[in-house]
Image (spheres, grey):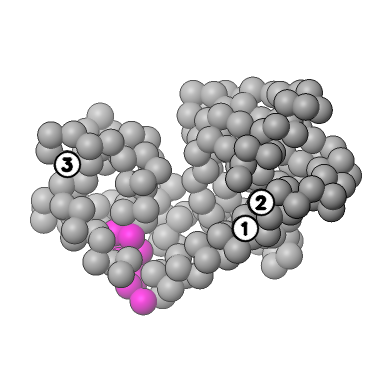
Amino acid sequence: MSECILHFLEEKNMPSITKKKHTYLMIDGHDQEYMYVLKEGIIKVSVILCDGREFNITYIKDFDVISLLKDEINEFTTSQFRVRIESDTATFCRVPRELFFNEVKYNSDFKNYVDTYYRTKLKEAIIRQQTMTMNGKNGAVCAFVYSLIPLFGRKVKKGIFIDLQITNDDIAGFCGVSTRNSVNRILRGLREENVITMVYHKILVLDENYLKRYVQ
């Protein structure tokens, strides 16, 4: 379904911008009149809470109309929306908001994409909240690591290699854990049980089924 968006971007010759790893794409304030589309790369989406802590929402890989996610989040919170580049580079298109939503109004494929996007993100949010509520800190971390498999997992001889370097601070921000020390303790326990190990500062999943039980 994303083909209709890609065709639109090509047809309108929308300009692209490229950002480097661990820089930020600012889409607050003066950029409200634009929609941003991730064309290529990996980003982390988060919000800054009123006490200054960062709450991570999702990783996004390759194509996504990330401004739709921002609009959805702003329905429920006034917290600052933040997009950080996690791959070496990430490429975005910037589309005038009025032009984008005119296309939604008159193009049924566009409208279907937007409607499906909102439904999918709502479902993901409900599942994630359920996982965090029902399983506690340890289960939340296990479920998070499991969620990385379809995004960044690569099968290797010993298991599934998560080909993205993720810090304990990032994991804490995704799982509602207060400190990285708590995450470190949970990960150490998983290593001792041979559920995961670390290779080049990245996670290697040794026992996928152990993690999977926290998302069922």
Give the quadrant of the N terminus.
top right
The amino acid pointed to by label 2 is Tyr
- The residue at which mark 3 appears reads as 159
The amino acid pointed to by label 1 is Thr
C-alpha gap between disc 2 and disc 1: 5 Å
Q: Is residue 199 left or right of residue 53?
A: left
Q: Which residues are magenta?
A: 134-143
N-terminal label among 3 and 1 = 1
- Label 3 neighbour load within 10 Å: few <14, some 14-19, many 20+: some
Q: Is residue 196 left or right of residue 29?
A: left
Residue 169, percent from left and from top: 42, 48
Asked whether the residues under the numbered discs 3 and 1 touch, taking CB atoms below 8 Å apart as contact, a structural biologist would say: no
Disc 3 versus disc 1: nearer the observer: 1
Q: Is residue 77 above or below residue 5?
A: below
Between 71 and 85, the one nearer to me in the picture: 71
The amino acid pointed to by label 3 is Gly
- The residue at which mark 1 appears reads as 116
- Label 1 neighbour load within 10 Å: few <14, some 14-19, many 20+: few
Asked whether the residues under the numbered discs 2 and 1 touch, taking CB atoms below 8 Å apart as contact, a structural biologist would say: yes
Q: Which mark is residue 113?
A: 2
Q: Which mark is residue 80?
A: none
Disc 3 versus disc 2: nearer the observer: 2
N-terminal label among 3 and 2 = 2
Q: Is residue 49 left or right of residue 189?
A: right
